[in-house]
Image (cartoon, rainbow, N blue to C red):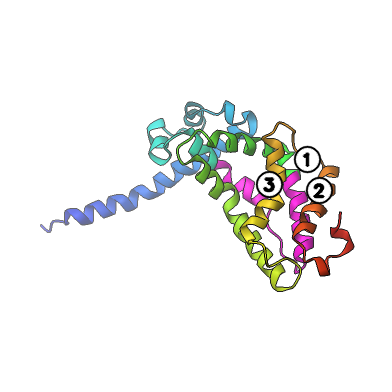
Amino acid sequence: MNEVPSAELAETSRRRGRPVSQRSRAAALAAAREILLQRGFGGMTVDEVARRSGVSKATIYKHWPDGFRLAVEAFGDTVTDAVPTIDTGDALGDLHDQFVRLAAFYASPHGRIATELIAAAITKPDGPAAVRERFFGRRRRATGVLIEHGKRAGQIRDDVDTELIIDLLFGPIIFRLFNGLGALDTDQAHAIAPVVVGAVALPALRPARWTG
C-alpha cells in the first residue's frame, strides 16, 4: 500500500479548507456591512456579526483582530467606490468635480459611517494606517496621477508637492467634520471647490472659473 506523504496531505487539506474559509470570510463581511448600514459602527458588535452570518466568533477573530478592523474592511470598498477618480483630460475640472462629489459623500448616511470609523481609528493600534489605505489609498493614488497629468499639461503648479496638493484639496472636507461643523452642503461645496482648485492652478493659465 502506497502512503501519501504527510506534506502532501497537509497541502491537500489546506486547499480543501480555503473555499470554506473564504465563504466564512465573505459572510462575516456581508453581515458587518449590513449592520454598519443599519446601526453605524457604534451599533456593530462581533457577537451580532457572528449571529447574522452564522460564522463563529473564533473564526471571525482568526481573520480580524477586532471588530474595528472587520468594519474597516467591510466598509472600505463602499468609501472608495462611492467617489471614483475621473480623469477626462481637464485636471482642474476633474479635481473640482471630485471635491464636490466627496463632500456629498460625507454628507450622506454612508459618509457618517465612514466618519465614525475614521474617528475610532485614532484609538486603535495601526488604526489610522488601516483607514488611510482602505478608505483613501486607491483614490489618493489615482488623484496623484491626475494631478501629475495636470502638471504636465500646464494646468497645475509643478512647484508644489503632489501629496501636499491632495491634502490641500480634500482637507477642508474632513477638517470640518472633526471640528463639529458638520458636512459641507452642496452650495458650500460648490463655493469652496473653485477656491482650493484655484490655489493649485497655474496662475498664468488659470481660467476665470477657478478664481472663486
Camera-nearest residue between 92 and 56 = 92
Query: Few, some or many C-alpha atoms within 10 Å of disc 2 (few <14, some 14-19, many ≥20)?
Result: some
Please give the residue where the numbered disc 3 appears in the rendered image: 171
Q: Compute the Cα span from label 3 to label 2.
A: 12 Å
Q: How many marks?
A: 3
Horizontal placement of 121 versus 154: left or right? Answer: left
Horizontal placement of 82 versus 10: left or right? Answer: right
Please give the residue where the numbered disc 1 appears in the rendered image: 184
Q: Which residues are magenta?
A: 74-103
Q: Are marks 3 and 2 in contact (CB under 8 Å)?
A: no
Type of amino acid under label 3: Gly
Type of amino acid under label 1: Leu
Camera-nearest residue between 113 and 158 = 158
Q: Horizontal and vertical percent for residue 135?
A: 59, 47
Q: Horizontal and vertical percent for residue 182?
A: 74, 34
Residue at 46 percent across and 41 percent down: it is 126
- The relative height of residue 94 versus residue 116 in the rendered view (above or below) is below
Query: Few, some or many C-alpha atoms within 10 Å of disc 3 (few <14, some 14-19, many ≥20)?
Result: few
Does residue 166 show up magenta in the picture? no
Secondary element at tag 2? helix
Mark closest to the chain's N terminus, 3 or 2:
3
Residue 192 is marked as: 2
Type of amino acid under label 2: Ile
Camera-nearest residue between 147 and 21 = 147
Instruction: Name, please, the residue furthest toward the bottom.
Output: 153
Residue at 68 percent across and 42 percent down: it is 174
Secondary element at tag 3? helix
Horizontal placement of 43 versus 193: left or right? Answer: left
Q: Are marks 1 and 2 in contact (CB under 8 Å)?
A: yes
Inspect this view and state whether residue 155 appears: yes
Residue at 74 percent across and 45 percent down: it is 103
